[in-house]
Image (spheres, rainbow, N blue to C red):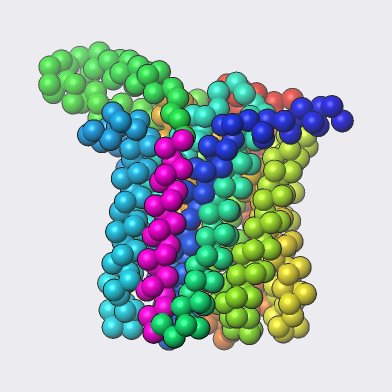
Amino acid sequence: MQKIIDSLAVYWERRMARIFLLGIISGFPWVLIGSSLTLWLKEDGLSRTTIGFAGLIFGVYAINFLWAPLIDRIRIPWLTRKLGHRRAWILTLQAVIVASLALWSFADPTANLGWVVGIGLTIAIASATQDIAVDALRIEQVGTSEGEAMAAGAATAVVGWWTGYKLGGIIALETATAFQNAGVEDYWQATFLVLGAVVILTNIGLLFVHEQGTAERISSQTAEDDRIASTLGVSGPMGRAAAWLGGTVVSPLMSFFRRNGFAIALTVLGFIFLFKIGEAFMGRMSILFYREIGFSKSEIALYSKGLGWVTTVGFTVLGGFFAIRMGLIRAMFLSGIAMAATNLLFAVLFWVGKSEALFATAVVVDDLTSAFATVTFVAFISMLVDRTYTATQYALMASIGTAGRTLLAGASGALVDWLEGDWATFFVITTLMVIPSLICLWAIRGRLRDMLAGAQVRLLGRHVEE
């Protein structure tokens, strides 16, 4: 019992509050280009296929690793000196999101869908770029040898993300409902102004998040630049430019493959890509499914967002603890299977029809398993990064995971239309989509211990099975 108490005590550390806020900042933009944009387009009469493909704007999260090296190295004038490297980037990109929401408040999807989606793409790019700095700042709050703190930090970040997403969804849906009931014609446009105010509030909280390890990171990056310049045998401005380019773009990728081995690194990336495809297919269409079987925006806000947030928060904290106690491989296998299987509950909901009790049950179970899978997944990829290139390497792995969830899931609406609205078959198909990722996980199970040791992180070290 004392060991359990000691393991949970880390959640009460002040830095966990900072990580929690970073999670909120990361999760909230998904409300804007996810639930809010989806319902806005739906209520303006656009088709499921159009809405599904509009969701391809999430694809930028899958490629943000391409510019992550620049976020790791480029300093923003004045702001970096005043706020720190990571916070300066976050604040700048939050300003872009607020400006985009202001533009949305003047837009009409039926008259100019391209303009609306273009603004959504701008929000997605700003959010995906912001996540590079957010994830790096979150990881750098914890030392490389603090195993349990890393797991707790991953769990706390996931709680924060879901808080930003779920509670942000409640704010969006209830605000839109209130404006609609008050007779505001462009109620979604008015809602986006309120959501912009929420973004501004998170910026105020960001001022209380401290940066650590900046000097060490710059020193390591400079040493790597010097090594590259020496290897190339060049000097002067051209030599410095070549060394900077090599240290910015090439070294982070080479470091990942060199430390883990080429074959294992590719298998890890394959697992990351495939793990949450089924969940993404289901998630992209879920809010349309809820509306089509008869649930109102307020009911969706209550069950999917409100009730879902409570269960997600509670089980994410416990999920981080269980991941430590039961072992990483076993935890990922169990969470992956459970996460996929819960999609079958929504198939049952389709067969039964509108049922608040069944809806609540499906949402709770789905959020429990999703929370467990997410915290295990985040802890796994957080452990593999080289602190010299935190932003770049984490962005690489996270964006590869996002690629499966966004690029492929863009066809989710077309799949439902092809099935002629047979939601039950759709949910069964999403359940089966987890199988390829588990095959990849099985292939790397015997090498995971070596990978964790190579990352110099003790998290789960004594619990990871061969």
Q: Please tell me whether residue 334 is drawn above or below residue 454 in the rendered image.
A: below
Q: Main secondary structure of the magenta part?
A: helix
Q: Quadrant of the C terminus?
A: top right
Residue found at the far front of this picture: 182
Residue 306 placed where, x, y %? 64, 63
Residue closer to the observer: 278 or 289: 289
| Residue 174: image location, x then y, percent | 54, 71
Residue at the (56%, 65%) spot, across then down: 170
Q: Does the magenta portion include 192?
A: yes
Residue 362 belongs to the span the image colors magenta: no
Residue at image position (30%, 31%) is 82
Instruction: Give above or below for 315 relative to 154.
Output: below
Residue 432, visible in the rendered structure: no
Asked whether, in this view, residue 374 is left or right of residue 213, the answer is right
Q: Is residue 385 left or right of residue 222?
A: right
Query: Is residue 298 shown to the viewer in this render?
Result: yes
Specify start and end residues of the magenta stretch as a single range: 185-208
Give the number of marks.
0
Q: Position of residue 223 (x, y in %)?
A: 33, 15
Quarter of the image for residue 297 reads bottom right
Q: Residue furthest left?
A: 237
Residue farthest right in this picture: 1
Q: Residue at x 50, y 83 (%)?
A: 181
Quarter placement of the N terminus: top right
